[in-house]
Structures are given as C-alpha cells and as structure tokens.
Image (spheres, rainbow, N blue to C red):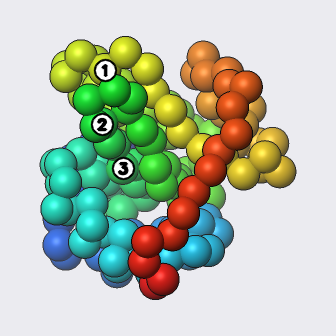
Amino acid sequence: MKTTMLIRPYREADEAEVVALWRECAMLRWSDPRKDIARKLRVNGDWFLVGEVGGRVAATCMVGYEGHRGWINLLAVAPRYQRNGLGRLLMDEAERILRGVGCAKINLQVRETNRQVIAFYERLGFVVDPVASMGKRLEQD
C-alpha cells in the first residue's frame, strides 16, 4: 500500500516527535538534537522539512546552502515507513529547493559503515566523492 506524506516546514510543536524519530533512527550521536533544531531554525528555517503521515512526524530533512554547495542533513524516515518512497520524496523536495536558488551540487555525509543508506543515495544518483571529510566541533553539546 502506498503511504501518503505531506511535506512541510518544521513547526515548534514538532520538536518532541522529531527528536523521538531521530532517536528511533539512531541519529543522536554527537550533538544535542534540540540545539541542532534551534541552530537550523536560525538559518533558512523553512528548509527544515518534515514529512507528516496521518498527522504525525514520519520523516525529516534539513536542507542547507551557503552559496557554493547544497547540503542534506538529518534525513530520517521512521523505520515503519522505510522503503515506501518517503525518503525519495523528501530528497526530491530538497533538490527542488536547491535548484531554485541556483545550487550546482548537493553534498551529504553518511557513515561509511551504513551501506543501506549509501545504497539509497546511490539509487538517487549520488556518488562517493574522492575527498576526505573533515570536521571541527565549535560547540560541545
């Protein structure tokens, strides 16, 4: 059966459901999710996408762009809805947003051990770039 999802910007009332979704998807590792949400809302807050199924948060995607590259962060789909095309729908919307501002390339990061998610992005046309991903924490959450 096809699942119908409404894609909309994040609302303050979504916080608990979003955090629970990220927890369910094992995405809470390095930072405080409430701080991540607050930081995103300060920069293109309307680009924090929520996928709603039956009035409940079922998926999320943070879309970013700094004028050079687009970024996808915290794409999550509740396990009970995975493999129903919801992740693809969120990525289609993210791509639409980024194309609309003239973005030429989308970047994202996936743990190299997460073969299932890497395969998902490969099906969407993403390739592994020959680069080293580097990071530096400016805040300790």
Q: Looking at the picture, how far across and down is residue 10, in whole percent? A: 22, 59
Residue at x 30%, y 36% (from the top left corner) = 65
Three-letter code for the amino acid on which mark 1 is drawn: Cys
Secondary structure category for the residue under label 1: loop
Q: Looking at the picture, how far across and down is residue 50, in whole percent? A: 31, 53
Q: Is residue 112 visible?
A: yes
Q: Quadrant of residue 138?
A: bottom left
- State which quarter of the image contains the N terminus: top right
Q: Label 3 belongs to which residue? A: 62
Q: Label 2 belongs to which residue? A: 65
Query: How many other residues sit within 10 Å of disc 2, few (<14), some (14-19) or many (≥20)?
Result: many
Residue at x 34%, y 26% (from the top left corner) = 68
Q: How far apart are marks 3 and 2 (CA)?
A: 10 Å
Q: Label 1 belongs to which residue? A: 103
Rendered position, 33 above or below 11: below
In this rendering, position of residue 93 left or right of residue 89: left
Looking at this view, is 92 or 101 the one in front?
101
Q: Is residue 6 visible?
A: no
Secondary structure category for the residue under label 2: strand
Three-letter code for the amino acid on which mark 3 is drawn: Met
Are the residues flagged by discs 1 and 2 in contact, CB closer than 8 Å?
Answer: yes
Are the residues flagged by discs 3 and 2 in contact, CB closer than 8 Å?
Answer: no
